[in-house]
Structure formats: structure tokens, C-alpha cells
Amino acid sequence: MAIETKIQLKDVHKAFGRKKVLNGVFLSVEKGQSLVVIGGSGTGKSVMIKCVLGIIESDSGSIQIDGEETRGAIGKKRDAFLNKFGMLFQGSALFDSLPVWKNVAFKLIQAKHLPAKEAKDVAVETLAQVGLAPDVADLFPAELSGGMQKRVALARAIAAKPEIIFFDEPTTGLDPIMADVINELIVKCVKNLGATTISITHDMASARKIADRVAMIHEGKIIWHGRKDEIDHSGNPYVEQFIHGRGEGPIKMQIKRD
């Protein structure tokens, strides 16, 4: 059976002025695969994701979804490929002025033009999938705990049954127990959907829980890519330093000086 590539980046570059953030990224993600991208702050993880989504236009290179070039896509073509995506943002990024169900159903209403009653039914059903009761649907985000907000954000990411989901630091700000609950929900929901996922995280516990494969980005390049069970024996000094959280090693913290 042929392996189907869902997402492919070839020699992707992005600079902001003189600062090169992506410096030739090559990355391939198979259909149905869960890839976790690790790396320190400022290494290009979020910029890479935003380039795939077209939120930021890369300077050069190729970004393909299902074998189709998406870099520079506009209008209906861009809308068509964006419809394949779901996203869980860092910090949840819920709309404070909307009740929970409208947050969850936002894409269903805005992009798919589902009537409000049907959209609310889908939202309540999706909230149940992440362990939230129907009465949560009519609450506002400010009335929820951080863990509940993260569950709502996950429900929003999966409500439209996307083919591809991006998770941006999905457990940031959560205690270890709630982080593990969210990781379990991510694994379950993604498996049920059969979605292809890219997650970016500093949290190695999350990476080990949700990944099939792990890639490490450093100074705008993918410097290691392998199966989750290979990471502890990567032989790569950058990976070794990062996964063990060591101060000493080839990765140097940049300290701003006056």
C-alpha cells in the first residue's frame, strides 16, 4: 500500500528584515500521522505553522497539501485548502464575547453556513467528546477554568471534522494532571477523526504521549526527524540537550543585554 503524503514542505525560507527565521525547512507528514515539532523559543516553530496556513507568506520554497501547491494561493483556492484545517491555538484564544457553543461552532457557522440550531447541536455533541456537559454550551469562556477552556478549544478544533489539525502548545499553562487529560483527549479525538496533525510544544511529556514521529527545529532548520521511540537514542547532541533540559550543550540561550 502506497504511503500518502498529506503535508510537504521543501526548502521553505522566511525572514523578517535581517532576521532569518526559517532557513530551508524540509518536512513531510504522512496522512493520518501525528507529528510533534520540538525546539526552543524563537526557533521557527510557530512561523512554520503560520506559513503552512498562509497567515504568513514564506519568502521561497514549496508548501504542498495533498500534492497541491498552496503557497501564494488566493480566493476560492485558499478557502478550499483552509477548509481542511482545524487549529488549537496557544492560550486557547476563545472569543470572550461569544458563548461556548458559538466558539465551538464558529467555523461551521462562518465558513460552512450551518444554521444556528444545527450548529449548536454539533457543538454540544462535540463538547461531549471532550468530556463537557451540555450546560457548558451556554456559558462564556470567562466562566470556565483553564482546563475547561482548553477542552473547548479542542472541541472547536475538531467540530468541523478537519483533515488536518495543528496544535500550538496544547498544554501550556496547565498543571501536569490536566495536561495529561488534554493529551489523552487529543489522542482519542485525532484517532476518531483519522486526522493528520502537527503539534508544536516544549513539553516532552506531551510529545511522548501524542506523537507518532518527532522533528526538532533549530535555527530555522529541521535538524532531526524520527519515530517517537527513537528520540532517546537519536545520537543528536541538540536533541539530547533539549529532551533532558540541560543548560550545558550546543544550544545556547540568547540573553538580551543592555
Image: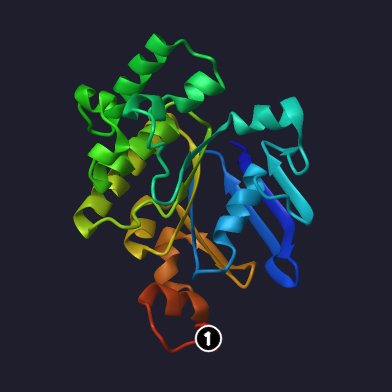
Image coordinates for residue 147, horizontal then vertical, percent: 25, 46
With 217 as the anchor, is 12 left or right in this view?
Answer: right
Image coordinates for residue 25, horizontal then vertical, percent: 68, 61
With 100 as the anchor, is 233 left or right in this view?
Answer: right
The residue that mark 1 highlights is 250
- The residue at 22%/51% (across/down) is 178
> What is the crowding at mark 1: few (fewer than 14 residues within 10 Å), some, or many (at least 20)?
few
Q: Is residue 236 visible?
A: no
- The residue at 36%/33% (across/down) is 155
Image coordinates for residue 145, horizontal then vertical, percent: 23, 45
Q: Is residue 253 visible?
A: yes
- Residue 92 vertical position relative to residue 114 in the rendered view, above or below: below
- Residue 199 vertical position relative to residue 244 in the rendered view, above or below: above
Q: Secondary structure at mark 1?
A: loop
- Residue 27 vertical position relative to residue 3 in the rendered view, above or below: below
Q: Nearer the viewer, residue 76 or 190?
A: 76
Check disc 1 and give the amino acid type.
Pro
- The residue at 72%/38% (across/down) is 67
With 250 as the anchor, is 120 left or right in this view?
Answer: left
Corner quadrant of residue 185: top left
By what rule are the colours in the image chosen?
rainbow
Corner quadrant of residue 97: top left
The quarter of the picture where the C terminus appears is bottom right
Image coordinates for residue 85, horizontal then vertical, percent: 55, 35
Q: Nearer the viewer, residue 117 or 220?
A: 117
The quarter of the picture where the N terminus appears is top right
Q: How many marks?
A: 1
Q: Nearer the viewer, residue 218 or 20?
A: 20
- The residue at 66%/27% (across/down) is 80
